[in-house]
Image (cartoon, rainbow, N blue to C red):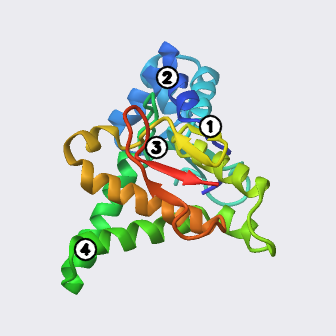
Amino acid sequence: MKVVEKMSDPLSALGVLTEPMRRRVYEHVALTGGEVSRDSVASALGVARSVAAFHLDKLARAGLLDVEYRRPPERRGPGAGRPAKWYRRAAGEVSVSVPERRYALAAELLARTVERAGAEGDAVDGVLADVARAHGRGAAHELRAAASGITDGPGVESVERLADFLARQGYEPRMSEGAITMANCPFHALVEEHRDLVCRMNHAWLSGVTEAAGLPPGTARLDPASGRCCVTIAT
């Protein structure tokens, strides 16, 4: 399968579906449940092949369709021509929330915790902290790579890289003298019902992130306050 360069912005990807014909094309591919060609889409929707091709490729670039290049079974051997494009609905999903939420991350951390606690017989609280911290360190691999060259402790550049990383995770960091506070809680709805559990998980995950950034242990602190994330990061 040939790799198609795709959009990285979910909002832009979903915006592709606002064009009526493109939405029809996407819905047709989805309902087909398998691979479709440009010719089959054009025939099914009563449009020119070039129109079908244009919209199919737009959807592929948005990450909503996967593309495979191959020849139909009846076209074999010399003179068979170039492989044709075949499209199917992408297996992944695109979602957008404003403010940004990260419920999939919470689900992954909790699922890993349940599996490990069940297998090892350990208390869930301790396992969740270990799982979340390790995941945070892994997620912040770019910060760990940058911190590996630091010999005299983290400086302003390290803190700025950390703030940029947190912004990309949806935390909406605010840098002030001596601390980073975060205006958005990516786990807002879960916190409403399970505050203690989710805040501990969030604290452990951010502790792993700050460790990857080369900041001292204890830099990420549980510091609940109304209208923001429950963690502050000392700088």
Residue on which disc 1 sits? 61
- Across and down, in percent, residue 129 comes to 36, 69
- Across and down, in percent, residue 109 comes to 35, 62
Amino acid tagged 3: Arg
Amino acid tagged 4: Glu
Between tags 4 and 2, which lies in front? 4
Asked if disc 1 and disc 2 are in contact, CB closer than 8 Å, the reply is no
> Which residue extends farthest front?
177
- Across and down, in percent, residue 211 comes to 58, 68
Name the disc covering residue 17, or none: 2
Q: Is residue 9 above or below residue 119?
A: above
> Which residue extends farthest top?
20
Name the disc covering residue 88, or none: 3
Residue depicted at x 18% and y 84%:
121
> Label 4, label 3: how many angstroms apart (C-alpha)?
33 Å
Q: How many marks?
A: 4
> Which residue extends farthest bottom?
120
Q: Earlier in the sequence, mark 4 or mark 3?
A: 3
